[in-house]
Amino acid sequence: MQAIWRHGDRAPGELPYPKDRYNETYWPRGWDQLTNKGIWQSVELGIWLRQRYGSTVLPVFNKDKVLILSSESERAVETAQGVAAGLFPPMDDRVWESSYLRYWQPTPIQTAYGTIDAILRPTKINCPNYDVANEREEAAIAAQVNSEYGQMFNWLQNTTGMESIDFWNINDLYDIQREIDHNMPQPSWLNQVFNGSTIMDHIRELKRVTRNQEFNSPTKAKFRGGMLVNRFLENMENLKTNKTTKEAMMYSSHDGTLSALLYALNVSNDQLIPYTATVLFELYDDETVQLFYKNTTTTAYPLTIPGCAQICPYSQFMGLLEGVRVRSLEDLYKVSSIERICITEEQIIKKKYQ
């Protein structure tokens, strides 16, 4: 079993706009950090994973059979800790404290801290190949958005106190959604209607369009998601050839990571990735593979790779995804002027992920 999830609910990185009144004091753990809601979402995901796998591959934490890996981001690490708390409550002879810590025990979380994290933070990688593939489409979309929403952008500029608003920074306002999620009263102008939809609905839709535009072609999806696809396939290969004893490998990451993966697998629904959404890879003893996606519900929805059935034979599954794999940063940057630097970083990453 392999799982990768987005971190839990978090605070904005800063004020969404200059006139916003909800400064950092409204977020107990500070900007960019998990909220209480996000911590509980993480624990709930762990409980859900325990219900699904507790009788098979995840009865207890076993360092030889289980790996939990996180990006270096604090919110991703803390989410992994929350998932582990829900997934591995101490039982029987693992109970070490009988009062207020009765259902918690420490669980190791590995990170690639201090290195380029091309697997769990692919959107942070400087990739000239990706830039070439992205620039032309991005410019065309930007021109269309700026033309269609120019009047609204000008109005928002005066209302929010932002110096300017266009395709390139409209997503800053999406952090308002985080305030809405925490029941913070909002100004009435967010409910004003422009071209048939409220201002807030437009902000949500523009966030969806601009986010998905980063991944929505085979080339872009491969550049951003190919190394993660390779990691999952390598894990299955290594398990089948007895090169690893790990039966459960779990990854704590970000919305862009899951979007890149879903587009690379050609199974994206073109929607934004909610907090603690999870993609599952299941390899069975009968040489078949199934994929599932869990969003905000308690149901894991099956994903079907184009060209295969929902329950896909292992060899066919591997063959269908061979063209998506990016096996190293050297491959990712093979036409780049900074290839030598990337090879060095790739060696560091391999060491960290072993």
Image: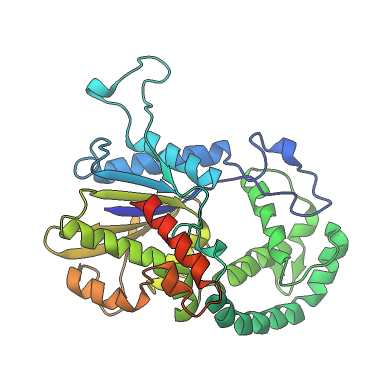
Residue under the point 35% across and 49% down:
250
Q: Is residue 12 above or below residue 241?
A: above
Q: Is residue 258 visible?
A: no
Residue 57 lies in quadrant? top left
Q: Is residue 165 above or below residue 71?
A: below
Residue under the point 72% across and 82% down:
143
Q: Is residue 68 visible?
A: yes
Residue under the point 38% across and 52% down:
351
Can you give x and y, in whole percent of width and height, for residue 162 in the image?
83, 60
Q: How many marks?
A: 0
Colouring convention used in this rendered image of the protein = rainbow
274 displayed left or right of 247: right
135 displayed left or right of 143: left
Can you give x and y, in whole percent of width and height, for residue 24 in the image?
73, 40
Q: Residue furthest top?
A: 99
Residue 224 or residue 290, whichever sits in front: 224
Residue 311 lies in quadrant? bottom left
Can you give x and y, in whole percent of width and height, for residue 251 in the image?
39, 51
Q: Residue furthest left?
A: 286
Can you give x and y, in whole percent of width and height, for residue 300 in the image?
34, 56
Q: Is residue 140 above or below residue 13?
A: below
302 displayed left or right of 221: left
Residue 81 lies in quadrant? top left
